[in-house]
Image (cartoon, helix red, strand yellow):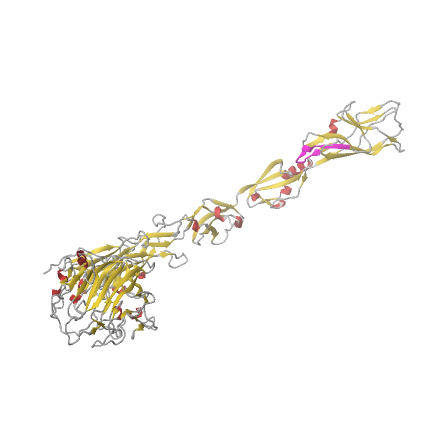
Amino acid sequence: MKKYKKVGFLLTSLSMVLTLFFYFQSANESTIRAEHPEGYSDLIQAPGVNVVDPIGGSEAEISGDYGTMLKITENTRYEAKGLKPDGIQVVNNTLGTTDETKSRIFKFDPSYVSPDGEYSVMVRNAGLYNGKSIDVKFVIDEFNIKESVDSTGKPVGGYPHFNFLAISYDDLQNTSAAPVSGMTSWGKLFLLVGSAGSQMADRYRVGDGVKYHYEFSDSETKAPITFKGTWNYDNVNGVKAISFDFNSDTDFSKLYVLDPTKVDIGKNQTWNLGYKRDTPASGKIEIYGQNGTAGLERSKLTNLIDGNKYFTSIERRAHSSSLAEFSTSKMGITYNTQSLARITPATPIVTGRKNSATHLEPEYGQLQYSILQTIADNKDVNRNTTFKLETEVPEKYEIDKNSIKIYEYGTNILKNDLFNIQIDPLNPSKAILTAIDSKSEDFNASIFDIKVVAKRKANAKFDKADDNYQKGGNDDGFMVYELAGPKTKATYTYVTLNGTTTGATLNSIPDVDEGKTLGKVLYEGVPDGDPKIGLIFPKGTDFSTIDRQSAYLDNLRVNTVNPIDLPVVVSYKNGLPDSSVLGEQKVTLILTTAKKVTTEKEVTITISDVSTSLAITFVGEDNNELHDPETLVGNTTDKVDLSKNTTIQGIVLDLVAKGYTLLPWDNPFPEKETPYSAGTVTYKFQGNLALDSVPKTLDFGNLTYNAKDQRVENPTFKEKLVISDTRANPAQGWYLTAELTDSMKNSKGQELVNALRYVDKGKETVLDSNAQVVYANTEGKDGKFVVSDKWGTANGTDGIKLQINSSDTVYTGEYVGIITWKIMAGQP
């Protein structure tokens, strides 16, 4: 007797099953009892094969880390190729409301030439593999089916179809009139091929067979994937033989069979499965049993597979020599998740969500993720005795117990009632999900899609490093957290073949390459600023003119230091401060980021009647300073009437006296109501070139004519001849002209000609009715010039002179004339 052994080959997978049970023995068929079919080797005795005790439990354990399970979901769809126009049959008694939502049969006719070049059914979203939805494509490679005949061998026309049953999601739990007896629901017939029941009752002759394979691909990318799983055959008996790839002796270690001494007790049936190597072709193995009875435990077989495609075939056999030559039988294959050996729970697969909710939305700041937990479809004896899932988020978050939703994967069916959900009393960041009954039918053969929401703790402070805050790239503005690893783990126990309770812990695995285990949470920066200390504003301050951005706060900032959150705008919460009341007051400011996140900041300001100074300046037309500025001191709330200030007006009058013209008032505030807080006001003047005064009379005295030359050098006068130059640019100079606008005449109108002379630097000019230059200023200086102070009294000195020559005709009398003086800018 072969000894049991603990199997060293472990494949992390759940099971995929092909169940062959659609031949039912007729009443007149005899039972053949034998150890294994004649001409075949006993599979139980094959080197390295795994023998499983179906009663005491499985010592050979297959790892479930790859999480493989094929099942119907809301997203499962079917796409067939190679069908005749009438090759689709809607199944009766199913629940769908339209042909597309009812279950259907795809009927492949061996005699039909497919215009698509293939005979296939693509099953979209056929299951879950390593956390990803996968597509499974069924492809017929070769028909070897003979024409249909009657019991005498006479052709009756046509060929039996090879059928594919496409079960809809609506029929997943439907138990009404299933086409195969013994099946509890339509969902059990997922991926059925061949024939079975009254609605797909095609029958096949001995030797009929079909070669076909399955292809596996990613549902999202459509790219092929390497699939690892268990392929389980059922009812390998005398009605049919199956075959698949088999290349070496070590392949026997991938096969699992039941111990024939511990199954079917009381049924008096003793045969085993037999095998042939390199049959029906090199590199293949053919498995065959005896007797046509269906449903025996020891006719089951599990094969571990690894690859993008799985090739298999089925061939109709005669299990009894008494069967007629042209006898026919149904022959079908379906999918089942239950393997012979125990399969462990799969490693939890964590998928983080990118939460882009803003601070204006209720989901803002939530850390959201899901955990896919696959529980293999094990026989009762191989099921887990306990199962617990623990998941922990960063300590800045706490898990909301009420937010945890557990769904059957691919459906909206809640499974929360299968778990006791608790938050760790010592750690609000950790949730513990314990299976209430891990051996139950409801818990077994499930893929749990566990949705988790964690909320940020109220006292959690943002930290760019701790929160792994991203600046730039696709995740700009997001906090990123790794959610897989030892903080999300599954722990289970089970009973071994010898009755020992054992178990293991499965830590989830971070997705380093694609980052799918990362939870991402949008974080919108919070504005901040440092209130200034000792803020004093004068009474009466117009706060509408105050720069809010800089007046109250230093270091205006956002805690993310991210340009996407800038700028920060400062506004008043309760309107402008009141500047009419002296003393302290609180001002609440609202800081708002570019993303409209706000923070309130309170600053203290003081309204004070403080002393300040007002500067008064005096400038010319070129803003040249004409006098030193004056400073007046007063309170910020007071005003001064500069038009009555003696000091200021004294300066104004003095400048006017110097020849400046005062220009109109040109300041922001009235001259009579200038606030001390105005800062600086300016008096502006226009400079001038002017004759300030001229002698009203020049008295040359009395002369006695004696026929000689007579000259008066020093006339008497009171007013001086004064010129003022207050221009901003006096460099161009000026000159003085004199014109005898009324000639010297006596009372009789007799004229004294050529008598008045003007001497300047030795040059003597006879005055007449023409304006003649008598004096020129070339120094380019401003100020007052008293020209008459340069007049001399001696011969040859400057000044105005009177000369009568001996040859002149002179009449007696008092002579009077008028001299007109003119000042001109520039040089003569």
Q: Is residue 727 magenta?
A: yes
Q: In the image shown, does 491 or 287 lie closer to the viewer?
A: 287
Task: Please give the name of the residue rendered at 80% of the width and 25% of the height, measured from the top-left corner.
Answer: 713
Q: In the image shown, does 448 or 639 lie closer to the viewer?
A: 448
Can see residue 827?
A: yes
Q: In the image shown, does 208 or 359 lie closer to the viewer?
A: 208
- The quadrant in which the C terminus is found is top right
- The quadrant in which the N terminus is found is bottom left
Q: Quarter-wise, where is residue 116 in the image?
A: bottom left
Q: Is residue 66 magenta?
A: no
Q: Quarter-wise, where is residue 236 in the image?
A: bottom left
Counting labels gives: 0
Q: Position of residue 179 (x, y in %)?
A: 25, 73
Horizontal arrangement in the rendering, residue 80 relative to residue 797 (left or right) = left
Q: Position of residue 814 (x, y in %)?
A: 86, 30
Horizontal arrangement in the rendering, residue 280 relative to residue 751 (left or right) = left
Can see residue 408?
A: no
Whether 450 is drawn above or below 472: the answer is below
Horizontal arrangement in the rendering, residue 744 relative to residue 343 (left or right) = right
Q: Quarter-wise, where is residue 131 in the image?
A: bottom left
Q: Seen from this angle, which residue lies furthest left?
A: 1
Question: What span is in magenta?
Answer: 724-737
Whether 585 is drawn above or below 827: the answer is below
Q: Position of residue 21 (x, y in %)?
A: 20, 69
Q: Position of residue 528 (x, y in %)?
A: 42, 49
